[in-house]
Image (spheres, rainbow, N blue to C red):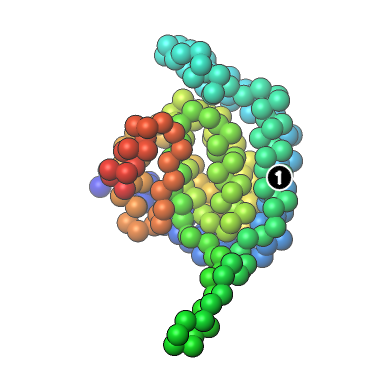
Amino acid sequence: MTDLTARMLDLGRRARAAAAALREAPAAARTRALALLAEKLKAAEPALLDANARDVEAARASGMAEAQIDRLLLTPARVEGMAQAVATIAAVPDPLGVETERWTPANGLDIARVRTPIGVLGVIYESRPNVTADAAALCIRSGNAAILRCGSDCLQSSLAIAALIAEALAEASLPADAIQLVDTPDRHAVGLMLTGLDGAIDVIVPRGGKSLVARVQAEA
């Protein structure tokens, strides 16, 4: 077993344990974590812009096209927008435990469809660092743990955002491992996630171009 495989399997085990705790957590705790995250994103704007500047510098040095760099770039307005998006998700009514349908078949059973967490989501995305905050917020709101794998070009920005997510979760008395970011640019990490990490990941969610989606469809 390689070091990367061991590290990824450890992420999976920790995410699985966190998912069990998160699904039992009260809605108020998840709402508080999101409200805290929105505040932290605003307060950490200088640090986020500094981390993003390192990503942008490396992208330019590698010859990345300016259109792609624009997707990667964070500005004060974009940080504010990221924080506002998290605050908006925090304000969404809690979806868990909501009955969406009820019916009685011919055998007389009373059957209801109720919203519950999926478990652990593996989210794979490319150059936009705001997806780190967006994906985390949606998972927290819905009571799901997540393993996030960003594009290597936005790794420094995403690491800075992920640190704020962990702080917000801990301060809301939720497991910080509920949202974990793969902290290596090694592309083999994606392949390992697509194997499910020994059953730890329930669903893979790709957000990116056709090649990424095609790889997930072929290998997951």
Q: Which residue is drawn at 62% across and 24% down?
A: 74
Please state the total of marks drawn on the protein image. 1
Farthest residue to the bottom: give it.
108
Of 199 and 213, the residue lying toward us: 213
- x, y percentage for residue 91? 73, 51
Farthest residue to the left: give it.
1
Up/down of 88 relative to 48, above or below: below
Up/down of 111 relative to 215, above or below: below
- x, y percentage for residue 97? 61, 68
Q: Which residue is drawn at 59% across and 40% down?
A: 133
Local crowd size for mark 1, using a 10 Å CA cut-off: few (<14), some (14–19), many (≥20): some
- x, y percentage for residue 160? 58, 34
- x, y percentage for residue 52? 58, 24
Q: Residue at x 53, y 30 (%)?
A: 128
Q: Is mark 1 on a helix, strand or loop?
A: helix
Horizontal side of 36 relative to 108 (left or right) equals right
Amino acid type of the residue tagged 1 in the rendering:
Thr
**Residue marked by disc 1:** 88
Quarter of the image for residue 23 reads bottom right
Q: Which residue is drawn at 71% across and 25% down?
A: 77
Q: Can residue 183 be seen in this view?
A: no
Q: Can residue 43 be seen in this view?
A: yes
